[in-house]
Image (cartoon, helix red, strand yellow):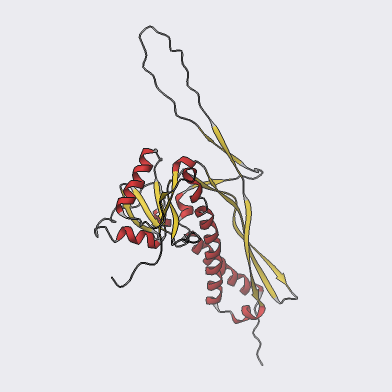
Amino acid sequence: MALQIATTGQLDEAQRIAIAQARFTAEHNDPCVNTIEKLTLKQGEKSVTVPKVAQMEARELEDGVDLVDSEDIGMTTVELTTGEVGLKVILTDKLVRQENESVFRMVGRQMGDAKSRKEDTDVIALFSALNGGTVLGEDGKYMTLQNIAACLAHAKSHKFPRPISIVHHPNAVHALTTSLSPTAGTYPIPSGLSAEMLKDFWAITIDGVAVFHDGNIGKLIGYDSGYGAIYSKNAMCIIRSKEWGTERERDASLRATELVMVADYGCFELDDGYGAPMQYEIGDPSTSN
């Protein structure tokens, strides 16, 4: 009887398929990460300190009178560090012997979805603390054009630096888009944001602010509404010490190979005043109107 044997080279090829798929999925499945600042910890660094300076005031002068008053830089700092996150997949020898490429694509897709969802939900978890925890909107309200206009006014009056994004659940975005004309979303994603990474999540651009949908936003406990947010790119950040990497380890007694993926990163609020949570209904809309 002929035997099917999987060589080390074949296993390497199969794992590369899984890894490549994981990276592809991750890069195109985390909208929030692509709307905030990205920082990097260099080799040997434990943390990074991000400074912020206050506004200065220009004053009227009188001819021949010395300028006495001086302005304070008003610098404050935020210290950021990272933590390890990872996942493991076990590829059994029996599975490898089958050499079914679709299996490795499936594994890669699952791993990519898992790590993207983790990073995305880490950013979403920051929404509720923006604006000192003061929420725009409330339970029982829908994300209508009128309410969005008020949120945009809040962003402008509080001087959010551009680019500014709105991110909310697809059902919340539905309430907005159904009330607009068919041509309202023809404007491109504003500059400063990656159109390649965000095009699949972009719904509409209103007054220069892009609105994105994110299905990882969940309902608040006991409510049919959830927190999205309106924020400047400078409001939050993801800081990386180590990008997602992979290692392979043979487990002879298990007759399998472990595929481990680990990253070292953290998601943080940079400026509380450059964003605000938005609470609107995210229950399923009627499909029989």
Residue ID at (36%, 40%): 156
Residue ID at (71%, 70%): 250
Q: Position of residue 32 (x, y in %)?
A: 46, 54
* Side (left or right) of 285 relative to 106: left
Residue ID at (36%, 10%): 62
Based on the displayed image, in which of its 4 quarters is residue 152 positioned? top left
Task: Choose between 151 and 95: the one closer to the eye.
Answer: 151
Give the vertical position of 256 relative to 122 (above or below): below
Task: Choose between 267 and 265: the one closer to the eye.
Answer: 267
> Which residue of the protein is positioned furthest toward the top in this rendering?
64
Give the vertical position of 92 relative to 30 (above or below): below
| Tally of marks | 0
Q: Point out the image quarter for the C terminus.
A: bottom left
Task: Choose between 270 and 144: the one closer to the eye.
Answer: 144
Residue ID at (55%, 33%): 76
Q: Point out the image quarter for the N terminus.
A: bottom right
Q: Position of residue 3 (x, y in %)?
A: 66, 87
Q: Position of residue 160 (x, y in %)?
A: 40, 40
> Which residue of the protein is positioned furthest toward the right in this rendering?
253
* Side (left or right) of 207 relative to 10: left
Q: Position of residue 285 (x, y in %)?
A: 35, 67
